[in-house]
Image: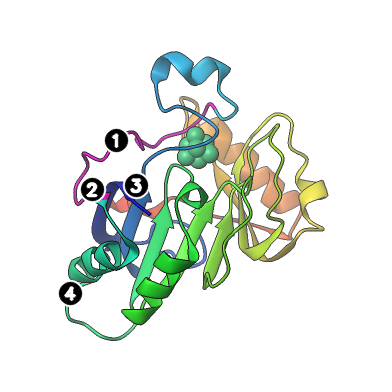
Amino acid sequence: MTYAVKECFLTLQGEGVQSGSRAVFLRFAGCNLWSGREQDRATAQCNFCDTDFVGTDGTGGGKFADAHGLADHVSAMWGTEEAHRLVVITGGEPMLQLDAALVEALHDHGFRVAVESNGTIEAVPGIDWLTISPKAGTDVVQRRGNELKLVWPQQGIDPTALETWDFGHFLIQPMDCADAQAAMDAAIALAMDRPKWRLSLQAHKVVGLP
Ligand code: SF4
């Protein structure tokens, strides 16, 4: 299988329970909920995306002919440190490309494999940390994982209905949008009203990391 990678770089994980952890960020190209073109945003199933996932032209991006080649690339980004190896695989929608061969190749390099998905495609086995971020109006088939991260507010999603899903952590994250303060207020209000949800901020944006 050939993998199309938008970008790949070493950073600190900025979101969720593992926020602050050193990690290689591997962003796959492509998403099943939006083309990534601005002219399609208004009619897309997901229209609040803050990510460029089109093409393979980002830092450390490219096309990789097989799982071992991509795992070697990720490992080179991490460097020689043997302990606490973490790769965060995102997109776009990573489940369009992630397969068991790549998970295994990354494990062979000693990585814990974290994945952030919109949940509309069932996750492959072997993932060590699975984050699902549901989008309104979509059919979420992956209702089990480590953390559920709900970008808020979103019309058409009832957080109380998600509370029965099988996740260890329920995170509410203010939407990165034109009215950021209103989104923050709405997220705080939800966390205050329903304590199962914990406020989660995009720390990488606060500290100026990519
Ligand atoms: S599902 Fe995720 S990657 Fe795809 S358009 Fe929405 S926010 Fe962007």
Circle 2 sits in a helix, a strand or a loop, which is it? loop
Q: What residue did someone put label 2 on? A: 61
The amino acid type of the residue labelled 3 equals Lys
| Highlighted range, magenta | 47-63
Q: Is ligand 1 within 8 Å of the beta carbon of the residue shown at mark 4? A: no
The local crowd at label 2, few if under 14, some if 14 to 19, many if 20 or more residues have their Cα within 10 Å, is: many
Q: Name which of mark 2 and mark 4 comes first in the sequence.
A: 2
Residue that appears at 19% across and 52% down: 60
Query: Which mark is drawn over residue 55?
Result: 1
Q: What residue did someone put label 4 on? A: 79
Residue 210 seen from this side: no
Q: What residue did someone put label 3 on? A: 205
The answer to if 154 sits in the magenta stretch is no
Distance CA(mark 2)–CA(mark 4): 17 Å
The local crowd at label 4, few if under 14, some if 14 to 19, many if 20 or more residues have their Cα within 10 Å, is: few
The amino acid type of the residue labelled 4 equals Gly
| 38 in relation to 137, above or below | above
Distance CA(mark 3)–CA(mark 1): 23 Å
Distance CA(mark 3)–CA(mark 4): 24 Å
Residue that appears at 63% across and 35% down: 153
Q: Position of residue 24 (x, y in %)?
A: 30, 64
Please tell me whether the stretch drawn in magenta is mainly helix, strand or loop: loop
Residue that appears at 35% across and 50% down: 27
